[in-house]
Amino acid sequence: MKKITYINDNYINHNKAVVSVEDRGLLFSDSIYELISVFNSKIIDLNLHLKRLFISLKKIKIKPNFSKKKIETILKKLIKYNSLKNGYIYIQVTRGTSERKHEFPSNYKPTLIVFTKNLNIDEKIYKKGVKVITLPDLRWLRRDIKSTSLLPNILAKQNAFEKGALEAWLIDDGYITEGSASNAWIIQNSNKIITHPVNNKILNGITRQILIKILKKNNFLVIEKPFNLIQAKNSKEAFLTSSTMSVVPIIKIDNFYISNGKPGETTKKIIKLYNYHINQEKIKKNLLNKELKIA
């Protein structure tokens, strides 16, 4: 079956999907993206992802020529066309095509690209936990914008891969900000759950946002404040979150094992709570679809 991709009002064969060599997303990384998980063919936390997409577009002054409703329609069609069950949908919006100049073009039409990808994550990472390494945070200071300018992230991720780690935790001014493609969390001996506060130094992950609400609802103490490497290594437990991987236990930072080197009981509970949320999202979507069909 041919994979279908969307580019600027066209649903086309993925292998024939192209953009102009003068597209500003290609030339300058002058673009925004979102990556949205799909579980059992249902889109997870769509409204939050679209809200962040439009906020990021506003921050870099791209005026969208499409609505949230239009994007939702595109996503649903691609899930159907590509028979996507478990995976993700990638959305990218660029400032469009124009003569190569650093300043914004006076007239432009944004380029909208959407494609899907099947994803099967090895369940071992949840049962056995993973290793992360630490590196200096070399990214720009507007990490709150979900920009496609990801070269420092890519280099950090590759460094982690070469050292047998799943992720790289980044350190800025002595504090761990986040991972190259995830948010960072530690659990102290007092069962305080700590993650970096929302500011320009991190991307406020959608899974992060949802998990904070879930934890507080279930009477966990969540504190949003910076933590350093010593605190991380001395923590009771640690984990990371992302849209594609959800909640993943961390058992080793650099060459230092956390606690007994196994996923902790609190992290296991957190994984169960988040998985329950994912299943509830699926149930809500199914009920809504049934109601729409009846109406």
Image (cartoon, grey):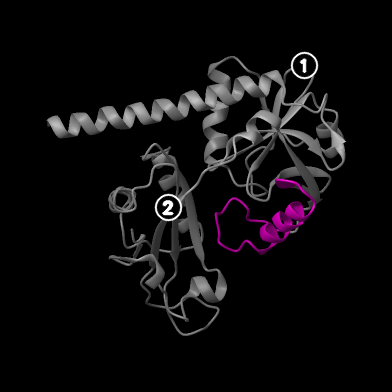
Please give left or right for residue 132 compared with residue 19 in the image.
Answer: right
Please give left or right for residue 176 compared with residue 66 in the image.
Answer: right
Magenta stretch: residue 99 in it? Answer: no
Which residue lies most toward the top here? 219
Residue 79: x %, y % from top left: 34, 48
263 in relation to 7, above or below: above
Residue 228: x %, y % from top left: 82, 38
Label 1 is placed on what type of residue? Ser
Label 2 is placed on what type of residue? Phe
Secondary structure under the numbered disc 2 in the rendered image: helix
Whichever of labels 2 and 1 marks the residue nearer the N terminus, that label is 2
Residue carrying label 2: 54
The answer to whether residue 123 is seen in the rendering is yes
Which residue lies most toward the left here? 295
Residue carrying label 1: 190
Q: Nearer the viewer, residue 127 or 231?
A: 127
Cβ atoms at labels 2 and 1 below 8 Å apart = no
Q: Residue at x 70, y 54 (%)?
A: 157
Secondary structure under the numbered disc 1 in the rendered image: loop
Q: Which residues are magenta?
A: 139-168
Q: Quadrant of residue 137?
A: bottom right
Residue 162: x %, y % from top left: 77, 55
